[in-house]
Amino acid sequence: MSATPRSTAEAAGTAINNSQIPKHEQLRTIILKLAREELEPGARLPSERTLMDSYGVSRITVRAAIGRLVNEGHLVRVPAKGTFVADSPVQSTLHLASFTQEMEAMGHVPSTVVLVAEAATAPEDTAEALGLAPGSEVVHLKRLRLADGRPVSVDDAWYNPEHAPGLLEIDLTGSVYKALAAQFGHQIDRARQSVRSEGAPADVGALLGTGTGAPVLAFDRVSYSGPLAIEHSRSWYRSDRYSLTMEVRL
Amino acid sequence: MSATPRSTAEAAGTAINNSQIPKHEQLRTIILKLAREELEPGARLPSERTLMDSYGVSRITVRAAIGRLVNEGHLVRVPAKGTFVADSPVQSTLHLASFTQEMEAMGHVPSTVVLVAEAATAPEDTAEALGLAPGSEVVHLKRLRLADGRPVSVDDAWYNPEHAPGLLEIDLTGSVYKALAAQFGHQIDRARQSVRSEGAPADVGALLGTGTGAPVLAFDRVSYSGPLAIEHSRSWYRSDRYSLTMEVRL
DNA sequence: CCGAGGAAGTGGTCCTTACCGGACCGCTCC
DNA sequence: GGAGCGGTCCGGTAAGGACCACTTCCTCGG
């Protein structure tokens, strides 16, 4: 019988092992579960030194795990007091996801009606956004997006044909982002967008079923794969079925 | 004369000292300048071990500095190859700033009309957001915000009186965030907000000069200082004078 | 000439130790 | 009872060492 103190972690069966996945990753999962399932929002976590003893890891590992959770918004560090469970569960909707992925993540069934799929002359602002000469030919795609069969948004998008040749030949009722990655090797990894509140244009109002002039969230987005501007899109979202949620810092 | 090797950093006059500001912070500034001013996007940074020698710090410090820059999108780490300057400069416009600060940053002159400043009973959702019992007394502040003398937004905010006693006695035409930090020691460092598109309520429409029902951006925000929920606010922004811009990743 | 093998270099992970300043609790002294 | 003072606990910072997986490049043998 050694006198080695049995850690609470071992007792709880949540010990950390030396598998391929890094210890700080394992610990992050454990702490997240602890914070979300056993503690109340606002409650204090065990101190970093306690955690290193409990799980038999160094403080660096503890700080790496907690640091990520803080960064993700699950925890809040307060110097000289402790680390606390953040009040609201994080569901940072401010991520780069396609409509398809986003709706699936929220538990809805996405579907799509293709309204326009054609080669067309780029509007002026689109040409500029995609870095093309004015009047260049681009792929124009206009789609109505639905969740659980109900209209949520109208997407009007233009693609640089150089980076997505033959885009019109593929199935456009699914995720174009996924197709861009799979067929053309351009994984969209970054986008710049602005959001405004607008009265729905007539065609959009009709498609969304809100009527003309109803307030909608209007996105103007340029999507990039690395340094390449791939897509310029304008989207109108029904305000009663979609809102942006975000966590802001500093 | 000791044989201590003269670091290249000292030779370049960019040495790191033991001032109040942390070394990893100083190093972050140095590396950022190096990446943005002396290197091209895509270029490789000196290795972490080289940097620790150059600036006379430990690898932990180097990794902390680089880690932040990676997190902010300035650099990209590639295992076994090196750390590289990211392609595009980051300028996430999605920051946590008070109306005052934000307008000043955009080159406008902010002003404020206080519409309501009173102690009141917390609405249900506000009490929940601030973690108070239903029916608790809170400080209610409603203000019209202007830029260059033109109405931009209406802010309706509730404050936990425990964290901001005497808030009603101070000058409310300036930045409340600044006052909260200076008077009550609660620096707002985090907020969670959702954004919708709404038709302006009658009072808001009148104040903004848009008329009732005009599309406005409606924010619902809870602001935190560490783990403490300090403020719950609802704001309506004129869509023709304000839009959200953001850079999204991954 | 060319391919295999190894050495060197890189970021990734992890450990121990140490000190700092702020917050907090309980004690003593006035 | 109130003010002042340590001791203790907290996260923040920092050093220095170690091993790993992987890439890159150079050398040596075929």
Image (tube, coloured by chain):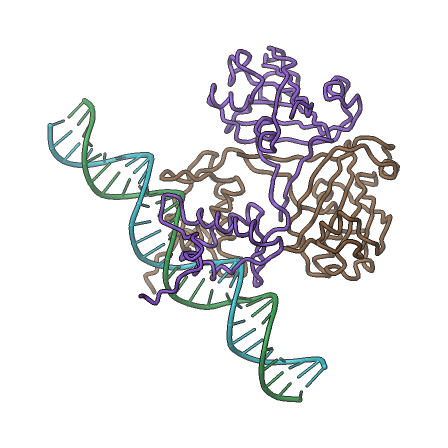
Chain colours: A purple, B brown, C green, D cyan
Residue B11 is at least partly visible in this image: no
Q: How many marks?
A: 0
Residue displayed at 60% across by 35% down: B247
Q: Is residue A92 left or right of residue B215?
A: left
Q: Quadrant of the N terminus of chain A?
A: bottom left
Pick the front one: A15 or A124: A15
| Residue D28 on image: x %, y % | 14, 35
Q: Is residue A129 left or right of residue B238?
A: left
| Residue B21 on image: x %, y % | 54, 58
Q: Is residue A245 left or right of residue D16?
A: right
Is residue B2 shown above or below B56? below
Residue displayed at 84% across by 31% down: B213
Tell me where residue B95 sits by quadrant: top right
Is residue A18 shown above or below A177? below
Pick the front one: D20 or C3: D20
| Residue A205 on image: x %, y % | 76, 21
Residue A61 is at least partly visible in this image: yes
Pick the front one: A117 or B23: A117
Tell me where residue A124 sits by quadrant: top right
Q: Is residue A19 left or right of residue B38?
A: left
